[in-house]
Image (cartoon, grey):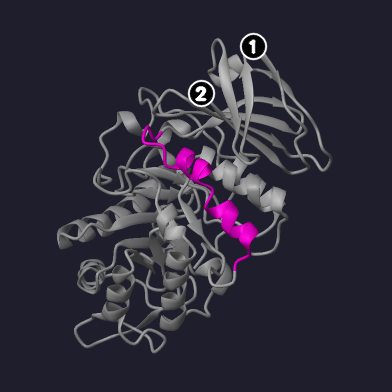
Amino acid sequence: MKCVVAAAVIGCAAVAGLDGVAGAQTRASSRLAVTPPMGWNSWNHFANKVDDKTIRAEADAMVSSGMRDAGYVYINIDDTWEGTRDAEGRIHPNSKFPDMKALADYVHSKGLKLGIYSSPGAKTCAGYEGSLGHEQQDADTYASWGIDYLKYDLCSYTKELREQAGHDHAKSQQVMETVYLKMHDALARTGRPIVLSLCQYGWEAVWRWGADAGGNLWRTSGDIEDNYARMSEIGFAQAGLSKYAGPGHWNDPDMLEVGNGGMNENEYRTHMSLWAMLAAPLLAGNDLTTMSPETLAILTNRDVIAIDQDKLGRQGDRVAAEGPLEVWARPLANGDKAIAIFNRWTMPLTMTFDLKTAGVNGSVKLYDIWAKKDLGTFSGMYTTAVVPPHGVILLRAE
């Protein structure tokens, strides 16, 4: 399920002598999540009302809608699938999921991958069976089912964390690293490539050590909600974290809310654009079987996805701000730049800024991605068209 412990992004400070995760030896597998994972997760829309039939229907819709062809591949089951353990300690799914291996085979037959959820604690967030004391056993079970992705949510282990570390932040980090690395190593021993997603709410500046704990991605914040205030609070608080992300290890500001109804179209475009600039995992959280054409158009915009999935793997960052207006920039593999101008105010605004702040020197051609329009050639100072309230102009500078 969504991580239930609320925590804001802690902030960003460089580790002395370490130029981000990319400069450190990491345990995160370089074979996995070479670009940010794309797919779907059950929690945001379905919460505990998820079962085998729902997962199959979402997998079907991911294919028929064109989302698979746009790059979305993971179908991730969040909390409440877990049943009981047998006499040997093996975990079994509950009655909502009568045959997890058959479900994985079905998802794989669609050209997709299946993800699952657990916790290093004794219980999950929803009170179901966690993996404490059964890490290798669970990893082996997941591999035998054909699982491709594990979201591992700290949840009930927070009690053990408090008992072991108290208010000692260094000890708290060490404890978390230990439990996550234990599952990483268990997954590695299965021989099956399984992406490991650390869900621990950004505690103890996880971006500094998440890759060394074996994470392919790690949550940098508490839970997202389907409203502009919470989405923007999380998204814009990622400023300064770009140095910690790269191929195989990504900052994760939580799942997408696009299409769940709590934001308008401009706000959802901002959500999608910001996540793309952040090289964030794109895990849709809506009902794919009933989404509107407008929602589908946002989720499958190929030019936006191309920014998110750019092979250089360089996360974007804020380069300029003026009151509620922010400019973010991201270098791309072919030498282009992605530039996003965000209006966080409730009225339309324009902004003038120096293209050099976005890393653009000399003349450059600008393409407006959402408007699907060539804007012409520019250099030096650039004045935007009107940016709508809570909206974005997303440019590719060629």
Please say whether residue 132 is visible from this viewpoint: no
Q: From the top left corner, tell me how far across and down residue 130 is, in percent.
A: 36, 72
Query: Residue, x 69% and y 56% (percent of image)?
Result: 227
Q: Earlier in the sequence, mark 2 or mark 1?
A: 1
Q: Nearer the viewer, residue 197 or 330?
A: 330
What residue do we see at 41% from left, 66% from top? 76
Q: Is residue 318 visible?
A: yes
Is 359 positioned to the left or the right of 91 in the image? right
What residue is rendered at 59% in x and 54% in y?
297
Residue 368: percent from left, percent from top: 62, 33
Quick one: which residue is furthest to the right in this view? Answer: 347
Q: Nearer the viewer, mark 2 or mark 1?
A: 2
Q: Which residue corresponds to the image point at 54% horizontal and 12% vertical from the top-left?
A: 361
Residue assigned mark 1:
380
* Mark pair 2, 1: CA separation: 15 Å
Looking at numbered disc 2 in the image, what kind of residue is underneath it?
Answer: Glu
Q: Position of residue 40 (x, y in %)?
A: 46, 62
Stretch of the chain drawn in magenta:
291-313
**Mark 2: secondary structure:** loop
Asked if the residue under mark 1 is in contact with the one under mark 2, i.e. CB atoms within 8 Å, the reply is: no
| Residue, disc 2 | 398
Q: Is residue 165 above or below residue 110?
A: above
363 in magenta:
no
Q: Indicate the position of residue 236 as horizontal and vertical percent values.
A: 62, 40
Q: Is residue 303 magenta?
A: yes
Q: Is residue 269 above or below residue 50?
A: above
Q: Count neighbours of disc 1 (C-alpha within 10 A) and say few if under 14, some if 14 to 19, many if 20 or more.
A: some
Q: Nearer the viewer, residue 25 or 322?
A: 322
